[in-house]
Amino acid sequence: MKKTLILAAVMVLLAGIVCGCGKTAGSKDDITTSSDKVRIITTIFPEYDWVREIFGDKSAEVDLTLLLDNGVDMHSYQPTSDDIVKISNCDIFIYVGGESDKWVEDVIKSAGNKDMMVINLLDILGERLKEEELVEGMQGEEEEEEGEDEEGPEYDEHVWLSLKNAQILCEEIEKVIEKADPENADIYKANKDAYVAKLSELDKEYEDVADGASMKTLLFGDRFPFRYLTEDYGLDYYAAFIGCSAETEASFETITFLAGKVDELNLKNVMTIENSDNKIAQSIIANTSNKDQSILALDSMQSVTSKDVEAGEKYYSIMESNLAVLKEALK
């Protein structure tokens, strides 16, 4: 996946605000961060929710911000000047890393707060990372089709959709939180241990469903951000686009190929991700022999909003719901 990132715009914003990165008396930022709370900025919802779980009943000790809180996913996000100020003033900044977060590098380098602790999820996972791949029948992006030279491997950024990864990431996030607030280290560790145990139990439930499934293949009439999940449980997949693709229209060849796979494998369902308009999935079904497949959606958590958070949305509950959908899909 290749995308144009206007890093010059970020630098212009930084030039105007870096000198004023400290809290200004009377400003909104001053009102919300003048206490001794640990100030944590997270880019996406899973990171945000993991931090909430680690703090638990100590939520009064943290000033926690979800940066992408309006449903815009990280692949198209560009920071505002307010976002940059918040990042520059925080104690801990947690982001995914990878191509979509290229803008972060300049923000961190120019941050006024040199004591800020930074957590890059991709760096933590290291050898567990998987490169983006074009599987048979998948429609590549225009730049890839034109053979544009790659600067290096592009890793699949959707690491949070693996419960195994989530456990590793929570362990590392908690260690950094301990450094920021050592007085409550025992509480944070206990909360993390309890939460990781829950994630481990849910991971085993996924394993049981996959091991007992009669069908081992998922077919997505959509982007495919679930590579880590499928590899965790030995599942195969076909899809219209890679997980980070900006494409929205599938070619006739892609539709025809995927419809043929539905027939060949006798699939009862075509998958999508959350908030899909289902047009590609419907086109695939319309080109199958039976034309009676159901459409099922897995939630990649890329569109969670602040309203969803206020309504009680949780990483664990979404992964629990995804398990129910997966169970149906693998019948």
Image: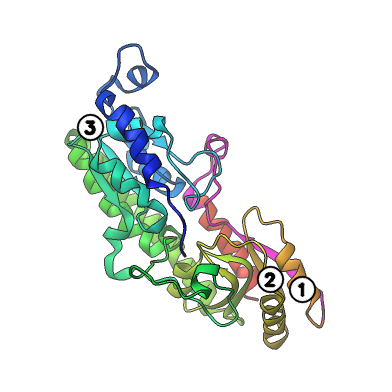
* Residue type at tag 1: Ile
- Is 180 placed above or below 237 here? above
- Label 2: which secondary element: strand
Q: Quadrant of residue 23?
A: top left
Residue nearest the observer in this picture, 293 or 208:
293
Residue 39 visible in image = no
In this rendering, which labeled residue sits more in front, label 2 or label 3? 3
Residue receiving disc 3: 112
Q: CB under 8 Å between callouts 1 and 2?
A: yes
* Residue type at tag 2: Val
- Is 176 placed above or below 139 here? above
Would residue 256 be found to the left or right of residue 23 on screen?
A: right
Residue nearest the observer in this picture, 42 or 193:
42
Residue 205: x %, y % from top left: 49, 67
Query: Label for residue 285?
Result: 1
Disc 1 residue crowd, few under 14, some 14–19, many 20+, Cα 10 Å: many
Q: Residue at x 82, y 80 (%)?
A: 290
Would residue 138 be found to the left or right of residue 266 on screen?
A: left
Q: Residue at x 23, y 43 (%)?
A: 109
Residue 249 visible in image = yes
Q: Is residue 303 magenta?
A: yes
Looking at the rendered image, the quarter that the C terminus falls into is: bottom right
**Is tag 1's residue or tag 2's residue first in the polypeptide sequence?**
2
Residue receiving disc 2: 270
| Gap in angstroms between the C-alphas marked 1 and 2 | 8 Å
- Is 114 placed above or below 285 here? above
